[in-house]
Image (cartoon, rainbow, N blue to C red):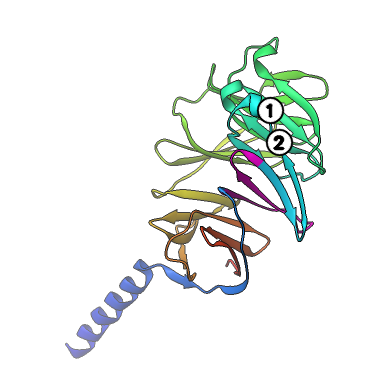
């Protein structure tokens, strides 16, 4: 009987341990004081990008470059995947602006003037001189060649609207209103990844991992349903960004960078 009781106690302890999020330690690297409404991220050259009063800025040490276009209204999305070809999306005007690394405007694309009707609600840079587009007119994903000014639909339509999206050169990821995570490759193949937990903000960091913020608690979630809570000093924050094992936390006091090793 004693051995049986010990066995049940052991099983209960293991169950509780695995039911809780494991802790992922972080190591503070530095803190940077900035004056911005939004922090957008870093590039591999050490520049960081911000928005303040709808002015897009690129900053490093004492160097600051700026771009603004009052006529197009609010900047909805900024894609920094290629810092030599930055994408600014002005959703209210159905327009994209492409910038070079000096923030000079290289191209303006008004999708309302396209021969194929497009109402873009999601934009990202793709491979081979193309842009990802979610066209809300037909609820399909397409690719727009900004050199040839040619648009093609690549996916079937999907009924649920997009809650969050993120893309790289070869894959367009999105999470729908029911918290289902999908991806679409450049050939139009859609893959359903998993159903994820509720979130306030989120970032997809690989094909099977996400960082989720809920009530200012950061957790890493993967398709094996493993969760790791990231320990940081900040109790509240405006935004987080992750890149190359660096977690950046943006608050009203500035940016704090942490080193984390994701299992």
Where does residue 59 sit, x and y in percent of width and height? 73, 53
Q: Overall secondary structure of the magenta stretch? A: strand
Q: Which residue is mark 2?
A: 87
Q: Which residue is mark 1?
A: 96
Query: In this orientation, does residue 142 appear?
Result: no
Find the distance from the CA under tag 2 to the CA under tag 1. 7 Å
Whichever of callouts 2 and 1 sits on the residue coming sooner in the sequence is 2
Crowdedness of circle 1 by 10 Å Cα count: few (<14), some, many (20+)?
many
Task: Identify which residue is drawn at 83% across, 24% down.
Answer: 147
Label 2 element class: strand
Q: Which residues are magenta?
A: 38-55
For residue 32, above or below residue 95: below
Residue 52 shown in magenta: yes
> Is residue 106 found left or right of 217 in the rendered image?
right
The residue lying toward the viewer, choosing from 2 and 121, is 121
Quarter of the image for residue 148 reads: top right
Query: In this orientation, does residue 97 appear?
Result: yes
Q: Decide: marks 2, 1 in contact (CB < 8 A)?
A: yes
Mark sitting on residue 49: none
Label 1 element class: strand
């Amino acid at each position: 009987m004693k051995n049986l009781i010990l066995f049940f106690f052991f099983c209960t302890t293991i169950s509780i341990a695995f039911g809780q999020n494991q802790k992922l330690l972080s190591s503070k690297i530095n803190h940077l004081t900035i004056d911005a409404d939004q922090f957008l991220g870093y590039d591999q050259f050490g520049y960081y990008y911000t928005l303040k009063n709808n002015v897009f800025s690129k900053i490093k040490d004492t160097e600051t470059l700026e771009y603004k276009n009052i006529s197009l209204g609010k900047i909805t999305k900024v894609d920094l995947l290629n810092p030599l070809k930055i994408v600014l999306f002005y959703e209210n005007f159905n327009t994209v602006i492409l910038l070079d690394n000096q923030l000079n405007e290289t191209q303006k694309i008004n999708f309302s003037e396209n021969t194929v009707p497009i109402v873009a609600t999601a934009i990202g840079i793709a491979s081979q001189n193309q842009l990802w587009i979610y066209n809300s007119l037909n609820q399909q994903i397409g690719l727009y060649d900004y050199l040839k000014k040619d648009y093609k639909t690549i996916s079937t339509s999907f009924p649920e609207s997009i809650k969050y999206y993120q893309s790289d050169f070869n894959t367009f990821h999105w999470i729908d209103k029911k918290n289902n995570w999908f991806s679409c490759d450049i050939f139009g193949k859609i893959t359903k990844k998993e159903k994820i937990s509720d979130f306030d903000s989120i970032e997809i960091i690989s094909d099977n991992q996400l960082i989720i913020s809920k009530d200012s608690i950061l957790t890493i979630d993967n398709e094996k349903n493993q969760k790791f809570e990231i320990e940081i000093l900040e109790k509240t924050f405006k935004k987080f960004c992750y890149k190359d094992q660096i977690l950046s936390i943006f608050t009203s006091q500035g940016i704090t960078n942490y080193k984390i090793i994701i299992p």
